[in-house]
Amino acid sequence: MTELWMTADDFTGALDSGVQLAKAGLAVRVALDGGLRENANGAAVRVADTQSRHLPPEEAKERVRAQMAAAAKAGVPVLYKKTDSTLRGNLGAEFEGALAGSGRQKLVFVPAYPALGRIVIGGRAYLNGQPLEKTALAQDPLNPVTTGVVADVVRAQTGLPVRAVVPAALEEELGREGPGVFCVDAATEEDLAHAAQALAPWAEHVVLAGCAGFAAHLPGFLRAPRQAFAPVGAQKRLLAVCGSVNPVSLGQVAFAEAQGAAVCRLTPEELLAPSFLKTQAGKASVQALACALEQAGWAVLCSARSGGHVEAVRALAAAQGLPEGGAHLAVAERLAEVAAAAFAGQRDCALAVFGGDTLFALAQALGVAAIEPLGELSPGVVLSRAQGALGGFALVSKAGGFGGEDVLCSIRQALLDGGGPLPC
C-alpha cells in the first residue's frame, strides 16, 4: 500500500526528495505522467512530477489539486508537497491546490535544507549565509527571487492565512481553529528533527510541504517495511546533459572540460531549431558525442557557456515569436533529442542530467515512464535506476545549483569505477 504521496513541480526535485525515503529502505517510484496512471507496483512512496514550476499560477494550482485529490481518494495517509529549496515556483497557488484537493485545512511548510546551506531564520531564507534575494537566484531568468521572507513569497499567490513559526511553537499553532499555512524556521538538522517530532500526531491530518531537506525526516511517519537495494553496477561510459543555466552548473561543466571531458555546446539557433536533428550540424553533434563516449568514456552536452549565451537564446526566441518562457522548453527538447540519439547506440553507459525540464524531456525521448531512486552520490546528486524503450540504465540527476565544481568528475569516478554507493 502507498503510505506517502509526494507531488513535485519539477523532475529533478521529484527525484532528490524521493531518494531521501529510498535511502531509508522504502520502495519509491517517481512517475513522469503525473502519477495518476502509473502503476506503483506496491511502492510505499509515490512521487509525481506535475511539471508546474513555470506554469501560470492557476494552472499549477489545478495540477496539484488533481494530484492531491487522487491521493486522498486512494486513502494515502501522508501527503507531501515538494518545493524548490530556494523558494522558486508557484508556492502559494500550489499550496491552495494541495489543500483543496486533499480536503485538509492546514499545510506545514518546512523549506530549509541545512546540508546544502539553505536555512530559514526569523522567517527569512538564506543561502550559504547570504539573504536569498541577494544571491545569483535574484537574477534567475525564469523565477527571479525578489524577497527571502518565506511567508511573503507564499502570500503572493494565496489569500490563505500564512504564519511564520519556530518548531517549538508548531504544535500549539496547529491546535488553533481554521485553515492556514505555517512556515517553519530551521537552521540545523536538529531543527528539522524537532519539527518532525512536533508533526508526528498531525502527519495524517495536514499537508506537509518542503524540499528534500525535510523529506529526509518523513520515513519516521511511515510503517512500510524496509528493503535493501542492489547497486547499479560499474558503468563504462557517462553521457552528461546540462540544461541548467545556473552559474553553478555552468562552472561544473567548465571544470569537467578542463579535466578532459569533451563538451558539445549548441548555438542559440541550433537550440531553437525544431528540425535540428535532421540537419548536418545536428547529425555531427550526435556523432561527436558518440565518438567521445567511445574514445574517452565521457562527454557533455550543454545548452550554454555563460549568461550572455542565455540572453542570446532568449532574444532569439522573442524574435521568433515564441511565447514568454517557451524558450526553456524548446531548449530542453533539443538537448533531449540530441542526447537520446547519441545514447541509443551505447552499452554500459550512464546518463547524468542537470536541470528538471531537461531530465523530463530526455526521459520522454527515451520512453521512460517511471524511475526508481536508489541513493545519493553526494547531497542532492541522485542515483536512480531507469527503464526505457532501450532497456534499463543508470541515471544521475541534480538540480542546477547543487554540488561542488568537481561534481561531474565525482559522478564519473563513482559510476565508472565502482557503480556508486549502496543506498542503505
Image (spheres, rainbow, N blue to C red):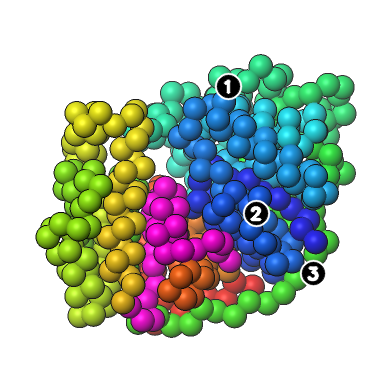
Name the residue that disc number 3 marks.
225
In the image, taking residue 160 as reference, residue 118 lies left or right, namely: left
Crowd around label 2: few <14 · some 14–19 · many ≥20 (10 Å): few
Q: Nearer the viewer, mark 2 or mark 3?
A: 2
Crowd around label 1: few <14 · some 14–19 · many ≥20 (10 Å): some
Task: Give above or below for 393 relative to 133.
Answer: below
In the image, taking residue 132 as reference, residue 303 lies left or right, namely: left
Q: Earlier in the sequence, mark 2 or mark 3?
A: 2
Name the residue that disc number 2 marks.
37
Q: Earlier in the sequence, mark 3 or mark 1?
A: 1
Q: Which residues are magenta?
A: 346-372
Name the residue that disc number 1 marks.
157
Q: Could you say whether the residue bearing mark 1 is in a helix, strand or loop? A: loop
Label 1 sits on what residue type?
Gln
Task: Tell me which residue sits at (63%, 61%) in the image.
Answer: 29
Magenta-span inclusion, residue 353: yes
- The image quarter containing residue 70 is top right
Magenta-span inclusion, residue 330: no
CA–CA distance between discs 2 and 1? 29 Å
Which residue is nearer to you in this view: 26 or 267? 267
Which residue is nearer to you in this view: 149 or 235? 235
Task: Tell me which residue sits at (80%, 29%) in the image.
Answer: 105
Task: Give above or below for 406 relative to 310.
Answer: below
Residue 354 placement (x, y as % from top left) = 38, 55
Label 3 sits on what residue type?
Pro
Q: Could you say whether the residue bearing mark 2 is in a helix, strand or loop? A: loop
